[in-house]
Image: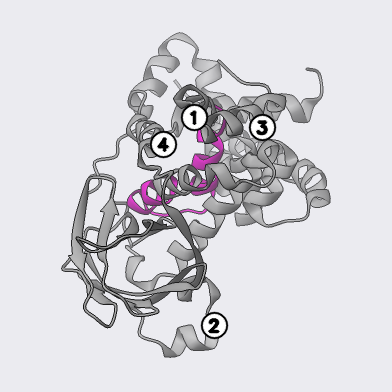
Amino acid sequence: MLVSPDDTGLLVRGAAGGDEGAWRGLVARFSGLVWAVVRAHRLTNADAADVYQTTWLRLAEHIGRIEQPDRVGAWLATAARRECLQNLRSAARTAPTDDMDRLDVTPAAGNPTEDAVLAAETEREDAARAAAMWRAFGQLSGRCRELLRILMASPPPSYAEVAAALGLPLGSIGPTRARCLQRLREEMAGIRDGLSPSS
Amino acid sequence: MHDPDDELEAELRRLAADREPVPAQLVQAALDAFGWRDIDAELAELVYDSLVDADQASLVRGPADQRLVSFAVGGMTIDVEVTSAGSGRSVMGQIAPPQRAMVDIRYPRDTVTVETDELGRFESGPLPPGPASLRLRPPPGGEGPAIVTDWISL
């Protein structure tokens, strides 16, 4: 169940007062945003898990001290971004490979490859489009990938939250989004032209 | 929703939810974070982190595996040096003004307690990398409020 953004301030005040249900509401509302910030920064899976967890622990400790409770999403996005930058700068942490196994972190819902195969059996067209889109997304410039990855959070983040997550001015989000979505369309068209669906 | 950009963004959102969902155990960790609050303790906030705040020149000069972090509350500061050794981390710290205290090094799966010397210094053995926070409390027989630091990723 989603919480309307207007209720966010109430959730923060509730959690500050010890209401665990309010905290669950905050996690439901912003878990996807924090994860999107982490994924946008291309950390290893172990570091991504650390940053995600550290961000929530930090909010828990700060929950009674948030100056603008209705803007806690931007607070979380900023905190997550700062943690990501710290991680990226830490030379000791730059593991070259993905260490999903080491930290025992596995994707929650099924195996993406299996999902894709299953989907292909039933809705081949949709699956092909999804595969092309995911690939096109991966081919975008770093800046576009970062911006779109934040926008792809569920539930959808506000532009203020996106701006906080990227350290960009609020006014730049709309125009950059339009440009990056157009670039995505072009990449997808290129993939379709280059790879006509066989079989 | 008929705006083509909005429709494309919604499609991307479904794709991300399908291919890169928040791992379930991380959502659980976020829920569990609430239990780590210490509402009676004072919060010593992170005021300096060499990884973030040091200028690039000193980052280049400094040892790559050494990180300096400072927390402050009221008139007290807690300086911590984090050293990487293989996949482990160790911390050496100093409380100012110097005083004896018990230091709980908290991380999500465990807590390690060390004691400061009379100069306010403390140090840990190897710790796992990941989120950590310090909780300072008076030694047995002492009095005063506990102090917790901001969480950082070791």
Mark 1, residue position: A23
Whether tag 1 and tag 4 are in contact, CB under 8 A, the answer is: yes
Mark 4, residue position: B34
Q: Residues within 10 Å of mark 3 (few under 14, many from 20)?
A: some
Q: Residues within 10 Å of mark 1 (few under 14, many from 20)?
A: many
Q: Which residues make up the magenta segment? A: A29-52
Left or right position of B26 against B116: right
Mark 3, residue position: A9
Indicate the chain on which mark 3 is placed: A
Q: Amino acid at mark 2?
A: Gln
Pick the quarter of the image with the N terminus of chain B.
Answer: top right
Question: In 3D space, how far apart are the residues under numbered discs 3 and 1 (Cα atoms)?
Answer: 12 Å
Question: In 3D space, how far apart are the residues under numbered discs 4 and 2 (Cα atoms)?
Answer: 36 Å
Whether tag 4 and tag 3 are in contact, CB under 8 A, the answer is: no
Tell whether position A38 is magenta: yes
Secondary element type, mark 2: helix
Left or right position of B58 against A141: left
Choose between A65 and A184: the one closer to the eye.
A65
Question: In 3D space, how far apart are the residues under numbered discs 1 and 4 (Cα atoms)?
Answer: 7 Å
Q: Main secondary structure of the magenta part?
A: helix
Looking at the image, is mark 3 or mark 1 earlier in the sequence? 3
Q: Amino acid at mark 1?
A: Trp
